[in-house]
Image (cartoon, rainbow, N blue to C red):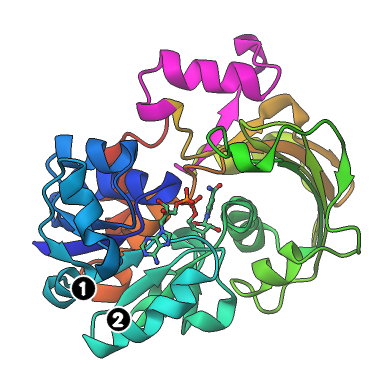
Amino acid sequence: MLQVAINGYGTIGKRVADAVGKQPDMDVAGVAKTRPNFEAETAVEKGFPLYAAIEDRADTFEEAGLEIAGLVEELVDDADVVVDTTPSGIGAKNKELYEEYDTPALYQGGEDADVADVSFNARSNFADAANADHVRVVSCNTTGLSRVIAPLREAYGVEKVRATLVRRGGDPGQTSRGPINDILPNPVTIPSHHGPDVETIFPDLDIDTLGMKVPATLMHMHSLNVTLEEAVDAEDVRELFAGESRLLLIPERMAIDGSGKLKEYALDSGRPRGDLWENCIWEESISTVGTDLYLFQGIHQESDVIPENVDAIRAITGTADAEGSMETTDETMGVGL
Ligand code: NAD
């Protein structure tokens, strides 16, 4: 059993911990937190050993009535792999700690690409992480774009990708980002940084992206135009996507007109936290004009990277190949509604 440490137990960390706990070949060795808030209490209730991420604050856990198993250094030392899910920029600072204990580490998309040897998306470049010590699971948006681009490249070849990313202003719990009521070109410069991030997965891809931010919390929305190397029928693209477990095609009959109903559907389906781990592609939006493909997809920023983290654990430890890992992850988590 792989012993997995999770450093940083917030939006991404708590989801990674739950997903790791479901795997037949992994155990949650422990989770590290900076302070004893509601998430720390839930971690203890779930039976995850709780470690203090900052030594000076270790006492605050005891004072809040939460027993800790030790300091993050001990957790990192004992684990086979650590998943760093701390806020953007902190992961790079933690790298030294992981190197000191010679523990392979995964980082998240908020870190710069150069924090790691490899930027990772399971569907696109699983094998590249095989001999790496430091792997970055790309951001929610880059994950969403990569999952669509990979099968299109294989089936038809991709000449150019143009994407407009309408991004949520903050996660539902991120009160620090609001209240807001505006529509921001963000970043206002074009192209946005998202395209170069996708190029960390597909170095030879021609892609331009534009970013916006809107006062929404539930999901991002991508408006995508891919120029293919051959003319293709929309129906063929639908069939191609239907064979991808992490692409969810929303049929017209379901009358899901936006992120609100999508999240409602996830909750009704019994998804934990209403998570949508798949790209949510509106089936009737898939259209072709000559070699140009168009579609809309919803990306649940809080959860689409979770199956990718589980696969990255197997990739960096060399314990499975892409197909085997993705199959196990999808089956145990219930990916593919
Ligand atoms: P978050 O703020 O919800 O959670 C981070 C947690 O780490 C918090 O509990 C925080 O208290 C804790 N923390 C802070 N400093 C720490 C330290 N030194 N050691 C240990 N823990 C520490 O953040 P998040 O949204 O989960 O983001 C984590 C990473 O995942 C970032 O790189 C982010 O860019 C990336 N990411 C976030 C999303 C998203 O939409 N939330 C999506 C994809 C990727």
Which structural element holds mark 1?
A: helix
Classify 78 as above or below 140: below
Amino acid type of disc 1?
A: Val
Residue 179, by quadrant, is: top right
Tell me which segment is drawn in magenta.
245-273
Q: Is residue 101 visible?
A: yes
Residue 70, by quadrant, is: bottom left
Q: Name the side, left or right, on which 144 lies relative to 274.
A: right
Q: Is residue 131 visible?
A: no
Residue highlighted by disc 2 = 98
Image spot of residue 304 (x, y percent):
49, 45
Image spot of residue 321 (x, y percent):
29, 67
Amino acid type of disc 2?
A: Tyr
Quarter of the picture containing the N terminus is: bottom left
Residue highlighted by disc 1 = 76
- In terms of sequence position, does the residue under pointer 2 or pointer 1 come before the other? 1
Q: Name the side, left or right, on which 167 lies relative to 65.
A: right
- Tell me whether circle 2 and circle 1 mark residues in contact (CB < 8 Å): yes
Picture residue at 69% right of the left edge, 22% below the top: 258
Residue 108, magenta (yes or no): no
Image spot of residue 46 (x, y percent):
17, 37
Classify 35 as above or below 96: above
Picture residue at 42% right of the left edge, 49% below the top: 12
Residue 249, magenta (yes or no): yes
Q: Name the side, left or right, on which 118 lies relative to 31.
A: right
Q: Nearer the viewer, residue 250 or 39?
A: 39
Classify 153 as above or below 11: below
Q: Nearer the viewer, residue 87 or 1?
A: 87
Image spot of residue 296 (x, y percent):
74, 36
Q: Residues within 10 Å of mark 2 (few under 14, many from 20)?
A: many
Q: Is mark 2 within 8 Å of ligand 1?
A: no
